[in-house]
């Protein structure tokens, strides 16, 4: 009976990220509009947009290869698996042994690799520019993510998210290295999701867009899958920050429905706070120039490296 309950909880966690990803996107858009004193779209608008795109007929370029057609599904699959690995309302579930930060980084890197490939597949100038910029940002974002992983692994003694979350619940205290890792992870999350100040997801300006340039040639169901994957990626990073640095309320596997319900309510509250902080940050800061982005990501790399070095010097840091 306990095994069946754990399997149900694992399946619920996988479906939960699919349900909440468009809702989180609509929530942040609504908050940004209200902070700018506009009415804004309804919170459920991303669901309607996805349904509208799915109903349309796909238009493909004549020189599009098989990669252009299958790329969106590969990107979505890698992003969904990565988002489902992050503990949301419970830890130590049946598949928690696969929730490794190094595997998570590899899955995110794989989705970025396929996205850059499909951006260049048709041969348009916009796709080439977007893919080039994406790889330039990734050359700094991925090392920064690895430094964050090493910092957390030195502190918790493992790279598994469930072990890290349990350690943070029971043994964590205010540490300089954790603060540096948190700031670095926030910077990486902004870059990975093409949010302000890295990119503006609400515009299609040719000289500034990064993510939108790579998906500009897509339409209908292919575009719907890519937009869904982008929403899942945003949920993934907010869930990752909540799991590592705010693990309060996470239930243990087999602890019962009541503990799972408390964990779910706690998780929804963390997402609400994270979405509000993201909207507040994006409305209070301007987008930076493209050539300043490496300096911004270099800060994340140095903070992650400094946090790891502080733990080598003294465990109290």
Image (cartoon, helix red, strand yellow):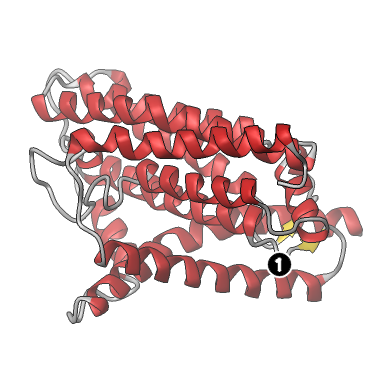
Task: Name the residue furthest right.
Answer: 1
Identify the residue under disc 1.
248
- Residue 153, given in percent of the width and then of the height, sits at 72, 36
Picture layout, residue 35 above or below residue 242: below
Nearer to me, 112 or 245:
245
How many marks the image carries: the answer is 1
Q: Secondary structure at mark 1?
A: loop
75 vs 244: above or below: above
| Near-viewer residue (252 or 299) | 299
Percent across and percent down for residue 280 are 33, 69
Q: Position of residue 284 (x, y in %)?
A: 26, 66
- Residue 123: percent from left, percent from top: 14, 19
> On the picture, is 33 further left or further right than 251?
left
**Residue 306 vs residue 214: left or right?**
right
- Residue 306 in view here: yes
At label 1, counting other C-alpha atoms closer than 10 Å, the crowd grade (few under 14, some 14-19, many 20 or more) is: some
Seen as rendered, the residue at the extreme front is 313
- Quadrant including the N terminus: bottom right
Query: Residue at position x 64%, y 62% from top?
Result: 246
Q: Which corner quadrant of the image does residue 248 belong to?
A: bottom right
The residue sitting at 37% across, 37% down in the picture is 297
Residue at 73% x, 53% y is 165
Residue 99 appears in view: no
Q: 130 above or below 34?
A: above
Question: Where is residue 12, by image quadrant?
Answer: bottom right
Q: Residue at x 24, y 52 (%)?
A: 53
- Residues 28 and 216: in front is 28
Q: Quadrant of residue 112?
A: top left
């Amino acid at each position: 009976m306990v095994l069946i309950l754990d399997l149900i909880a694992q399946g619920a966690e996988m479906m939960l990220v699919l349900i909440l990803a468009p809702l989180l996107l609509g929530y942040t858009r609504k908050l940004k509009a209200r902070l700018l004193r506009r009415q804004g779209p309804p919170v459920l608008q991303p669901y309607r947009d996805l349904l509208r795109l799915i109903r349309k007929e796909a238009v493909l370029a004549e020189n599009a290869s098989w990669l252009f057609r299958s790329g969106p599904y590969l990107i979505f699959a890698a992003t969904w698996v990565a988002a489902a690995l992050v503990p949301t309302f419970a830890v130590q579930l049946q598949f928690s042994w696969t929730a490794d930060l190094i595997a998570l980084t590899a899955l995110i890197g794989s989705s970025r690799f396929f996205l850059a490939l499909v951006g260049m597949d048709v041969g348009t100038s916009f796709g080439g520019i977007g893919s080039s910029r994406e790889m330039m940002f990734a050359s700094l974002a991925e090392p920064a993510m690895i430094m964050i992983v090493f910092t957390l692994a030195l502190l918790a003694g493992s790279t598994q998210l469930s072990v890290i979350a349990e350690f943070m619940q029971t043994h964590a205290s205010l540490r300089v290295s954790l603060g540096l890792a948190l700031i670095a992870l926030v910077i990486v999350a902004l870059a990975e999701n093409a949010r302000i100040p890295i990119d503006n997801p609400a515009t299609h300006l040719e000289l500034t867009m990064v993510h939108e340039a790579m998906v500009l040639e897509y339409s209908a169901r292919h575009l719907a899958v890519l937009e869904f994957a982008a929403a899942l990626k945003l949920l993934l990073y907010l869930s990752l920050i909540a799991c590592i640095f705010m693990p309060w309320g996470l239930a243990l596997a087999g602890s019962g429905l009541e503990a799972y319900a408390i964990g779910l309510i706690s998780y929804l509250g963390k997402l609400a706070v994270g979405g509000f902080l993201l909207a507040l940050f994006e409305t209070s800061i301007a987008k930076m120039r493209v050539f300043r982005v490496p300096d911004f990501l270099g800060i994340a790399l140095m903070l992650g490296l400094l946090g790891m070095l502080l733990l080598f010097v003294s465990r109290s840091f």
